[in-house]
Image (cartoon, rainbow, N blue to C red):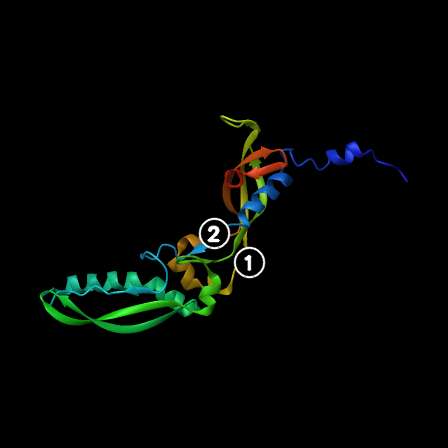
């Protein structure tokens, strides 16, 4: 049996070498910590439950104004209702007394709260995890250069990703229509860029390098 010197074996898997395999590993380790996010832009601050108070048109408003109010109300509640249909949220339709245009009036109110399914998918405040991205291929990367104001090397990589661990609710067309960014993130061969830094242990995505300090 032929014996291969250890120096050649170690050279085949040098974690400090700038190559597709090492960059794929570093980027995937970073992407595994990040969720594809849905719901963090629904127009309310804080945590669930979320209370939505539909806008009320004044009594003397013309039809065009009333239609505009209805359109704005629909835009406000539509994302929440989409997540109700997926089972992430539940809705309570109620009313409350308010002073509207100089008189007391009973107006509708919608309260959206998390279901158990929603609690399991929630990652922060009002954001749900719709899976993760994973590197498909490294398209190209820059020749490593010196890190500004520090030691080590840095390279920028251009790569494509695919979505993994995607729950069924995130594949729902209504959800993707409500969040076009989700549809883009789930597209195969989604192109992205990342800066990578060479450390004493190998290459690491730049954001992970800062967070590990």
**Residue 165: which numbered mark, if any?**
1
Residue 167's spot in the image, x, y percent? 51, 62
Q: Nearer the viewer, residue 165 or 104?
A: 104
Residue 150's spot in the image, x, y percent? 52, 27
Q: Are discs 1 and 2 less than 8 Å apart at CB?
A: no
Residue at (62, 33) in percent of width and height: 200
Residue 93 in the figure: left or right of residue 199: left
**Residue 154: which numbered mark, if any?**
none
Indicate the secondary structure of the residue bearing disc 1.
Answer: loop
Residue lying at the far front of the rendered structure: 213
Indicate the secondary structure of the residue bearing disc 2.
Answer: helix
In the rendered image, the vertical position of residue 134 relative to residue 95, given as above or below: above
Residue 198: name its quadrant.
top right
Find disc 2 in the rendering and name its residue.
Answer: 185
Residue 212's spot in the image, x, y percent? 54, 40
Which mark is in front, 1 or 2? 1
Residue at (23, 71) in percent of width and height: 108
Residue 56 in the figure: left or right of residue 48: left
């Amino acid at each position: 049996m032929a014996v291969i010197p250890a120096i050649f074996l170690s050279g085949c898997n040098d974690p400090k070498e700038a190559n597709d395999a090492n960059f794929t590993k570093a980027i995937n380790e970073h992407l595994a910590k990040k969720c594809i996010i849905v719901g963090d832009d629904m127009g309310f601050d804080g945590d669930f439950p979320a209370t939505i108070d539909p806008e009320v048109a004044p009594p003397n408003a013309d039809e065009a104004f009333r239609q505009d109010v209805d359109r704005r109300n629909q835009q406000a509640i539509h994302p929440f209702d989409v997540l109700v249909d997926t089972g992430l949220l539940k809705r309570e339709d109620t009313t409350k007394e308010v002073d509207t245009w100089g008189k007391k009036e009973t107006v509708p109110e919608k309260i959206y709260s998390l279901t158990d399914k929603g609690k399991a998918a929630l990652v922060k405040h009002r954001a749900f995890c719709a899976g993760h991205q994973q590197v498909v291929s490294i398209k190209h990367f820059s020749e490593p250069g010196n890190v500004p104001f520090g030691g080590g090397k840095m390279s920028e990589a251009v790569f494509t990703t695919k979505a993994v661990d995607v729950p069924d609710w995130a594949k729902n067309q209504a959800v993707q229509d409500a969040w076009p960014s989700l549809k883009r993130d789930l597209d195969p061969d989604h192109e992205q860029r990342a800066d990578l830094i060479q450390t004493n242990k190998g290459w690491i995505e730049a954001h992970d390098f800062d967070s590990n300090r």
